[in-house]
Image (cartoon, grey):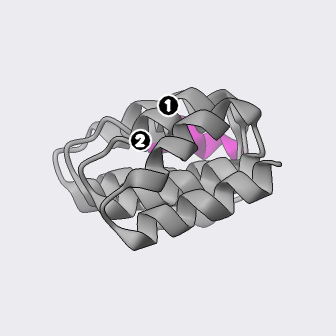
Amino acid sequence: AQHLGRSADPSVIPHLVEALSDPHPLVRSDCIQALGRLGDFSAVPALISSLEDSDPLVRAATIAALGKIKDRSAVDALIRCLHDREITIRIGAAEVLGSLKDRRATEPLRALLDDPFSQVREAAEIAIRHIR
């Protein structure tokens, strides 16, 4: 997956997407990182599906990849990640939503201002400022 992801050839994308169903989280995570490096919008639907992965490292890699691709079609899925049980996922989703500057995220981000963790609240505040 890493070798494929270093290629600038978009023909590798279907192979990386196919590997997202691998049983090993590290393989899935490597493929997601590779898709992020390639930065091709065609990978976004598969990445959005990976936001539902049971492994938090895979979800975190997916958020980072979506942040690199910067496709606003992922906004609704990223908003759902603001409710993830993992702090790192909530923070990452807030950061990417802030970078996308899509106003649909403003109210869901405001809800994070009551999060029990200061890092999550801070990420939400910064994201809201970026959107304004």
Residue topped by disc 1: 77
Residue, disc 2: 81
Report the amino acid beneath label 2. Answer: Cys
Q: Which sits in the foreground, 2 or 25?
A: 25
Most extreme residue toward the bottom, as rendered? Answer: 119
Q: The N terminus lies in which quarter of the figure?
A: bottom left
Q: Is residue 36 visible?
A: no
Please report the bounds of the magenta region as a residue range. 9-16
State the CA–CA distance, disc 2 to disc 1.
7 Å
The local crowd at label 1, few if under 14, some if 14 to 19, many if 20 or more residues have their Cα within 10 Å, is some
Displayed quadrant of residue 11: top right
- Residue 21, given in percent of the width and then of the height, sits at 28, 37
Q: Position of residue 47 (x, y in %)?
A: 49, 38
In the rendered image, residue 115 lying in the magenta stretch gets the answer no
The three-letter amino acid code for the residue at tag 1 is Ala
The residue at 64%/47% (across/down) is 97
Residue occupying the point 78% across, 48% down: 131
Tell me the residue at 66%/39% (across/down): 106
Judge left or right: residue 27 versus residue 114: left
The location of residue 12, given as percent across then percent down, is: 58, 45
Query: Residue shown at 47%/63% (left/top)?
Result: 121
Callout 1: helix, strand or loop?
A: helix
Which residue reaches farthest front? 114
Name above or below for residue 86 compared with residue 47: below
